[in-house]
Amino acid sequence: MTQDYTYTIYYSARNEAGVMWCPDCRDVESTLASTFKLDQAEGAQAEIIYLTRPDWKSPANQYRHAPWNLTGIPTVLKFSPQGAIVAKIEDADILDPAKLAAFLKQEA
């Protein structure tokens, strides 16, 4: 991953049984965990925003609007050191090794 960039993962919250409500999020969970070291107690390389199903489905959800403009989850945004969105990767593209590598290398 490129230095000084930050990443935010927009992801499904878990239900009472500990299961993500979003099947696409379940599909990419292990890829994101290994890519961003999410399973480590310290040193995770991304912030995670967990969204409940009602929150995500609401047209008023803040992440559906500028500056994020999310159209689905899971989504990972890459931010420059100045806070500008540099790149976005969504859904099944996260599982494509070439697309994920290109996303991680993309710079402002």
Image (tube, grey):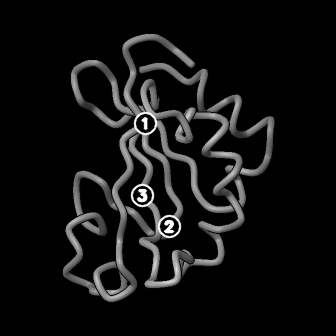
Q: Position of residue 33 (x, y in %)?
A: 61, 44
Residue 102, picture quadrant = top right
Q: Is residue 58 left or right of residue 95?
A: left
Type of amino acid at the residue the image marks with label 2 = Ile
- The answer for how far apart the CA atoms under marks 3 and 2 are is 6 Å
Label 2 or label 1, whichever lies nearer to me, is 1
Residue 75 image offset from top left, x and y in percent:
50, 56
Q: Secondary structure at mark 1?
A: loop
Q: Pick out the residue farthest to the top.
A: 3
Residue displayed at 64% across by 77% down: 23
* Residue on which the image places disc 1: 46
Give how far apart the Cα atoms at labels 2 and 1 are: 15 Å
Q: Eyeballing the image, is 81 above or below 91? A: above
Q: Which residue is mark 3?
A: 10
Please tell me how crowded label 1 is: few (under 14), some (14-19), or many (20+) other residues with Cα within 10 Å: many
Which mark, residue 106?
A: none
The answer to whether residue 3 is above or below residue 98 is above
Q: Are the residues flagged by discs 3 and 2 in contact, CB closer than 8 Å?
A: yes
At a point 70% along the width and 53% down the height, the residue shown is 93
For the point 43% across and 36% down, the residue is: 46
Residue marked by disc 2: 73
> Which mark sits nearer the N-terminus, 3 or 1?
3
